Image (cartoon, rainbow, N blue to C red):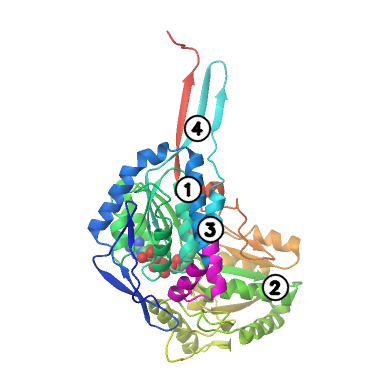
Amino acid sequence: MNAQRTFELLIDGVGVKGEKHYPVINPATEEIIAQAPDATRAQLDAAVAAARRAFAAWKATPIAERQAKVAAMGAAIAAHIEELKRLLTAEQGKNLADAELDVGGGAYFCRQFAELTPPVEVHEDSKARRSATYRVPLGVVCAIAPWNYPVSIAIWKVAPALVAGNCVVLKPSPFTPLTTLRIAALVRGIFPPGVFNVLSGGDELGPWMTGHSGFDKISFTGSTATGRRVMASAAPTLKRLTLELGGNDAAIVLAGVDVQTAAEQVFRAAFTNSGQVCMATKRVYVHSQVYEAFAAAMVELANKATVGDGSKPGTDFGPIQNRPQYDRVKELIADCRANGYRFLCGGDAQTPARGYFIPLTLIDNPPENSRIVREEQFGPVLPLLRFDDLDAAVQKANDTHYGLGGSVWGPPEQAEAVAHRLDTGMVWVNEFGSMAPGQPFGGRKQSGFGVENGMAGLLEFTTIHTIVTSKKLGAA
Ligand code: NAD
């Protein structure tokens, strides 16, 4: 569809052609749909230099103007949602409705951040002195996004960074650069040159960026393994960091739950975007009193769902986004087979002629130390784990180096009490995935640190500037 279409980098307010290119693959067809620019180190240097030049004036721009421009960015995204969602489905694989949610989420979060102003905290305002802390921007932000929600996750970084007065260089995942590059073209005229730059590239570009001395802050979303490398490369110049990393979120289903409703919601929590969601439910601990009924309801939902090309009407779940991740999910399925775990449904990869498709797969009570329980699968393969002792289930849910999210299902008071015992940044009780405007989102343990969304997310792109003024010494 886009094989002949040209995508450009955004550097210093102008579209810049790539000197080299690499192919972008549609994961449903394995066809090359476009060539994306593969930014060179010189182009990175140019983008960083442009951002540094632009910083002083952008920082001095009244915040209302910066907010208006970020709102305009949201409006530009919203105005092109039909085109953008189709492009996103083609490169990412998710169905068109989910693509609309990702693109629409980008527009929505632009509007949300455009309404936020960092507070001024007055500590003392007496006859003797005034002491107040202001929030000022950090400088130039390196924003790095993953391939599962390319638009929303990028905007969670770009919008607050710009509102706070920083300049930004954004890098989408090499697997999903096109929608981001198209948005860059759409918003080109909104910001002064250099304020917002977008570079796509291959595997070298990320490390070049995180090691670049021209950045003051890195906001990174991706795997925990890459997060460790990002943190190491930030050390030499002490760049500020926000790391939104992997998760192995547990759902705990209590006895006394409304089985059918909980199954429907946990099914959505686990399989949305074919399981490729950081905060997806990746393990489900189910009380033995309801285990059989819950498992049966989940199997029924899985068997009714349609896995296929996200651009086709009626598709509920698309393919795995890229070949390395597809191979990894297949390897986890093979590990379950090799160890003799029982499959309630799914299992063997469907073998259409093309496409990275995996059927929705449920594994019946594998051991706690199995790979499918211990590792982040990031795909549509879900272990159901039977428990009798709630304390033991909570202990197992917490027995991981991840700490991103989780959910609890059952009688509300009891479920909320369990929620307080989960060592994660987010817990949903009898619902899943809601993101209220002011609600901060972030992980604990090796799921990262720092937060996104809401005022707390905005403040991540600022530093303190405390000014103490004596009122005793007046003018001469
Ligand atoms: P990834 O870590 O492979 O890549 C993420 C981004 O980092 C990409 O843009 C990639 O090009 C870049 N990158 C790779 N190596 C780099 C390096 N050495 N230095 C700098 N940048 C580098 O992750 P992914 O496979 O794109 O995304 C899936 C992972 O992201 C999962 O673990 C998922 O849980 C996590 N994730 C977390 C959140 C969250 O908010 N916590 C949200 C979405 C995804």
- Residue 87 forms part of the magenta stretch: yes
Q: Secondary structure at mark 1?
A: helix
Q: Tell me which amino acid carries mark 4.
A: Thr
Q: Which residue is mark 2?
A: 262
Is the Cβ of the residue at disc 1 closer than 8 Å to that at disc 3? no
Q: Which residue is mark 1?
A: 69
Is the Cβ of the residue at disc 4 closer than 8 Å to that at disc 3? no
User: Which circle marks residue 107 in the picture?
Assistant: 3
Find the magenta span and give its range. 82-106
Residue 66, percent from left and from top: 47, 44
Foreground residue among 401 and 82: 82
Q: Which residue is mark 4?
A: 133
Q: Which circle's residue, 4 or 3, is located before the other in the chain?
A: 3
**Mark whose residue sits in front, 1 or 4:** 1
Q: Tell me which amino acid carries mark 3.
A: Ala
Q: Which circle's residue, 3 or 2, is located before the other in the chain?
A: 3
Q: Tell me which amino acid carries mark 2.
A: Ala
* Ligand 1 lies in quarter: bottom left
